[in-house]
Amino acid sequence: EYSDDPQGYSTYFFSSFMSHSCWPNAVWHYSGADHVLRARRRIEFGDEVTISYLPEHGLLQASPVRRFELHDTKRFWCTCERCTGAQDHSRGFKCPRCEDGKVFSRTPEPGPAKDATLMSQHLVGVSCDSCGEALTKRDVSRLVGHEKKLKKLVDDYASCKNGSKASPDLAELQSAEDFIDSVFAQHALADLAWEQLAEFHGRKRRYAKQQQMLGRRCRFHACAYEGLNGSHAWMMESQGDAMMRSSASSKASGQKNSKAKVWQATAKEDPQGACRLYNEAFAILSLMFGKDHEYAAQVDRKRCIAQKAVDALCTDEAASGRLQL
């Protein structure tokens, strides 16, 4: 493991004996002095037990990005099932022909790469999963141009966070959202953009829009990676948190104190939705890390709070029904 800020490196004895895969069948953590290894998908007799050398969110990146990151930090070029499969499910576009289906990039050729650039040749000739039409070189040129535009948007949004650029206004955010929706179907760069959009909307207390962006991130995480993934669970937890914030904010909206916070009226209370998301997140994290691990325990506490809000809402509705009778 390594950290850039603060700079540091660490080597874990047991984990160093296991190979990497971008579709690992195991995950590990420390519990005190104990090294805990758990299966994250079915392991058949004779299968090699593999772990990920990348963080959970790193497994959602496009193949060229994952491979270069692994080479840059671990000095090898990955040849796992996902890096050598037929399609890269983290680099998908809307079909420019039918606009209903998706077209996915091919994975990179085995062996060294110059950098993490998303190459145009991996798109030429790939077919839509709906209409079956193949991308032409002209189609690919347009899509790669859109990809570069989105990468610049993501970089610009990062500059806004560190204060070197002014934050985008609502019209600019909506324009970016429309652009992403018109081109990208299942793309890691779109996920990074939605992360930034959700943060911008959250700062301005536009919680309904924030929830919408978080929902898109959840769907991408579910589709881009087959099986248990911590990032998917944490994203559902974040969306649940946003729903519970909306619940709290809706109660504060009637305050007359001039110093009270002003909340978005469109952010509706949804403890049921939050409870559903917490349940799904807990199911993933408890399988990956155990029910007593801090990741799962934190979500469990939140789902208990959400369930109490659901119960209170049901009680209020029942009382209201009795009054009407």
Image: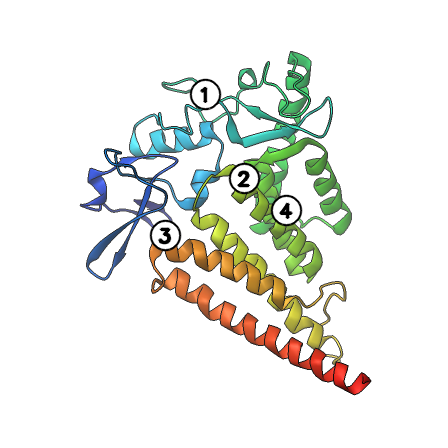
| Residue 103 percent coordinates (x, y) | 61, 25
Numbered badge on residue 108: 1
Is any atom of residue 180 visible in this view?
A: yes
Disc 1, SS? loop
Picture quadrant of residue 317: bottom right
- Residue indicated by mark 4: 165
- Residue indicated by mark 2: 223
Q: Which is more foreground, mark 3 or mark 4?
A: 3
Residue at x 37%, y 19% (from the top left corner): 112
Marks 1/2 in contact by CB < 8 Å: the verdict is no
In terms of sequence position, does the residue under pointer 3 or pointer 4 come before the other?
A: 4
Q: Which is more foreground, mark 2 or mark 4?
A: 2
In terms of sequence position, does the residue under pointer 3 or pointer 2 come before the other?
A: 2
Picture quadrant of residue 56: top left
Query: Which residue type carries mark 2?
Result: Cys
Q: Which is more foreground, mark 4 or mark 1?
A: 1
Q: Is residue 88 above or below residue 319?
A: above
In terms of sequence position, does the residue under pointer 2 or pointer 4 come before the other?
A: 4
Query: Which residue type carries mark 1?
Result: Pro
Residue at x 50%, y 72% (from the top left corner): 304
